[in-house]
Amino acid sequence: MTMNAAQLTRCEWCGEDPAYRAYHDGEWGVPLHDERSLFEQLCLEGQQAGLSWITVLKKRDHYRKRFHQFNIECVARMPDRSIEARLHDSGLIRNRLKLYAIRKNAQAVLNLYESGYTLNSFLWNFVEGTPIDNHFRTQSEVPANSTDSDAMSRELKRSGFCFVGTTICYALMQATGLVNDHLVSCYRHDQQTIH
C-alpha cells in the first residue's frame, strides 16, 4: 500500500507550500550532472544570498526567461545594457551585483572549459564523484558549510566566480546531490539515486 503525498514525512524546511514541497520531492538532493542545470543552480543559489530559497524558487521561471534559459554561452555574451534593463524587472531580485554575477559566472564557466574542465567535473571533484550520504536526524544537525564547501568556495573564487561563499556552496552541494542532507526520517533520504 502506497502513501499519498500528504502522508509522507519530509524534511521540515519545505513546510506546506506546494511549490516548496514539489522542489523538495523532485529536485533537491538529486545528483545533478547537466551543465546548464548546474550553472542555473549555482547562479540561483547566489541570488538567494540573504533571502529564503522559496523567494528564489518562485522567481526561477522568470529568471530562466530573462537569462536565456541559463544557456551559458548566451549569458556570457549579455551586454551591460541588458543586465541594466533587468534591474527594473520586478520578477527578478533587483540587486545589481547579483544580476551581474550571473554573467560573470557564465564567463567563468567558459574559462573552465578552456582549461579542460566542465562545471560538472569541477564541482563533483570536491566529493570525488560520489555523493556524501549524511544521516542527520534533526534539522539543527545539518551544517551551513563543510570543509568541502570551504574548498569549493576558494576554488570557485580563484576561477573567477562570484557569490560563491562557503554557505552558498554548501547549499549548492545539497541542492545538486553532492551531499544527501535529507533527514533520515524523510521519505526521500533513501530514494536518492545517481541520475
Image (tube, rainbow, N blue to C red):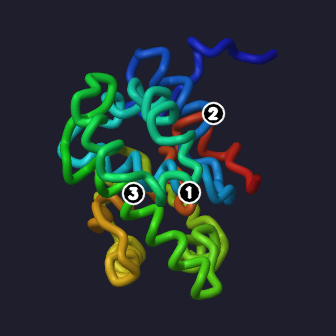
Mark 3 element type: helix
Q: Image quarter for residue 152?
A: bottom left
SS for dot 2: helix
Q: Residue at x 39, y 75 (%)?
A: 156
What's the amino acid at mark 3? Arg
Provide residue 111's location: percent of width, then percent of height.
51, 78
Distance CA(mark 3)–CA(mark 2): 28 Å
Question: Which label is found at residue 26?
Answer: 2
At 27% across and 66% down in the image, what residue appears? 165
Residue topped by disc 3: 103
The span from disc 2 to disc 1 (Cα, nearest Å) is 24 Å
- Image location of residue 163, percent across then percent down: 28, 61
Quadrant location of the N terminus?
top right
Residue 174 visible (yes or no): no
Q: Nearer the viewer, mark 3 or mark 2?
A: 3
Return the residue nearer the eye: 140 or 26: 26
Measuring from the top left, give residue 179's x and y in whole percent: 53, 60
> Which residue is painted at 39% across and 27% down in the image?
59
| Residue 127 position in % (x across, y down) | 56, 75
Q: Which residue is mark 1?
A: 72
Q: Nearer the viewer, residue 128 or 181?
A: 128
Looking at the image, is mark 3 or mark 2 earlier in the sequence? 2
